[in-house]
Image (cartoon, helix red, strand yellow):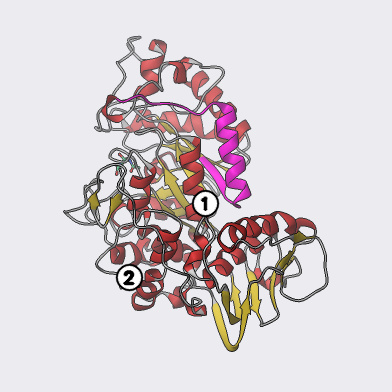
Amino acid sequence: MAVVAGALLAAGTAVPAGGDPAPAASAMDTIVPAPESVTPDPAANFELSEQTAILAPGEAAGVGEYLAGVLRPSTGFPVPVNPALPGTGDIALALDGDPGLGPEGYRLQVADDAVQVHATSPDGLFNAVQTLRQLLPAGIESATAQPGPWTMPGGEITDKPRFGHRSAQLDPARHFFTVDMVKRYIDQIAKYKINKLHLHLTDDQGWRLQINSWPRLTEFGAQTEVGGTPGGFYTQQDYSEIVDYAASRHMTVIPEIDMPGHTNAALSSYAELNCDGVAPPPYTGIDVGFSSLCVNKDITYTFVEDVIREVAALTPGPYLHIGGDEAHSTTDEDYVAFMSKVLPLVEKYGKKPLGWHEYGKAAPQGDAALQFWGTTNGDPILNEGIARGNKVLASPANKSYMDMKYDENTPLGLQWAGFIEVADAYGWDPADHLQVPEESVLGVEAPMFSETLETSQHIEFMAFPRLPAIAELGWSPKNTHDWESFKTRLANQGPRWQAAGQDFYRSPQIPWTR
Ligand code: IFG
């Protein structure tokens, strides 16, 4: 089922692809997210040709191959990647950037005979490549050979992120998403310098990650999903495949095991986890807040420790998300008692706790992170956390939830947090909105819960064009924040999504270029 321009088209209807010939080179000032500084040089354009090679010595090699993978299909050029070569017409990736660029920054120089990228790490080179591809015409994003010319506007860009944590969330629990669907989304969000992928792996409707010490969690707890259609799950090999693919896109996976609420799938899989010893049936609706692990049973903490141990061992990244939201069937006293036993387990297995902000009630210590998902301008629980040294991840539901409808006509999504058009997703500041100091903000996230979303087309329709707005809030300096500039730059992304065969919502707020 393809979704175009706000209408769900019958399955098999061709989504208009980017069939137009590559338009003139994008101007240097159309990049999303906005770079820190841009100095165009109209006298110098660089043209890709059959002879163009990529110079990618040492640790730059991986990014060199990634860039070649972007350029080869659409240009039809061989684009060899060399560890060291003389010659002009080359794109050189060098790890000689000045330290002031930081771990993710870069300097990109486009001259008529060469393109040079300087960074301090492969992450910085990868971010530069996301900018570099936007300097080429939209057709560069096509999977098939397109007519040139492949011209990049000349000039220099110096860039680094405002926040180090720029995240998107997927919810394979409500509706299961295959490994390939997750990889597709990883590639789409990497274009906007998103560097974290939060996977909401467990909920009432499904447990989606195999746990060897508790096999029924997926043997039984993954069988279905919202609406009663067959569910699915990630074997530990599948999960590692996602982790590795994300890492190849310089993205770190953050697994979420939601607890003590949102646990019907686990409770239905193991009767002994229930206070009354009776397993509830699998749940295929979309209510929340009715389930809770049994706080007063020892087996609950054996279960939680086994799960945390296995998930931590599969997760190279620093964070493990323990959920903590909507525990409406757990008393506050029990909730705090539960979290007070669980948080040390996260640390025991070498991870930092991250959770929906209400787990702040359990007073997590140090640089644990509170993910704000409220619809208010901040919350006292954040300020109490900051006083303990906690960090805040900004994902206000009325600004950043990609599963909210754009407006009353949107065929997909929910509306409990209100409608979110592109201007709403862009029109806030992560520190100011939460009324917390800049240095306490870890970064931003664009959650996308999947009660109403089943396919990649659904995911893309809801994420684009709003996710680039959240990505810009996470990456770009506050002083570049300007709606008139953003909506014009965003309009230039439309032909790129068409060329890539990716769905998006043609918001009436954006002056789409075609
Ligand atoms: N709130 C729930 C989610 C999901 C969401 C849908 C959080 C933290 C509403 N919790 O958001 O599980 O149901 O928009």
Quadrant of ligand 1: it is top left
Q: Which circle's residue, 1 or 2, is located before the other in the chain?
A: 1
Disc 2 target residue: 512
Number of marks in picture: 2
The image quarter containing residue 315 is top right
Decide: is 349 above or below 299: below
Q: Nearer the viewer, residue 469 or 176?
A: 176
Which numbered disc covers residue 187?
Answer: 1
Q: Three-letter amino acid code at disc 2?
A: Trp
Q: Using residue 234 as the reference point, say whether residue 203 is left or right of it.
A: left
Q: Using residue 397 as the reference point, say whether residue 317 is left or right of it.
A: right
Q: Nearer the viewer, residue 116 or 356?
A: 116
Which numbered disc covers residue 89?
Answer: none
Q: Could you say where residue 230 lies in the image, as x and y percent from the top left?
A: 35, 24
Magenta segment range?
229-254
Q: Three-letter amino acid code at disc 1?
A: Asp
The answer for how far apart the CA atoms under marks 1 and 2 are is 23 Å
Classed neighbour count for the residue bearing mark 2: other residues with Cα under 10 Å, few (<14), some (14–19), many (≥20): some
- Rendered residue at 66%/83% (across/down): 112
Classed neighbour count for the residue bearing mark 1: other residues with Cα under 10 Å, few (<14), some (14–19), many (≥20): some
* Residue at the limit of the structure toward the bottom, as seen here: 43
Check whether the beta carbons of the residues at disc 1 and disc 2 lie within 8 A of each other.
no
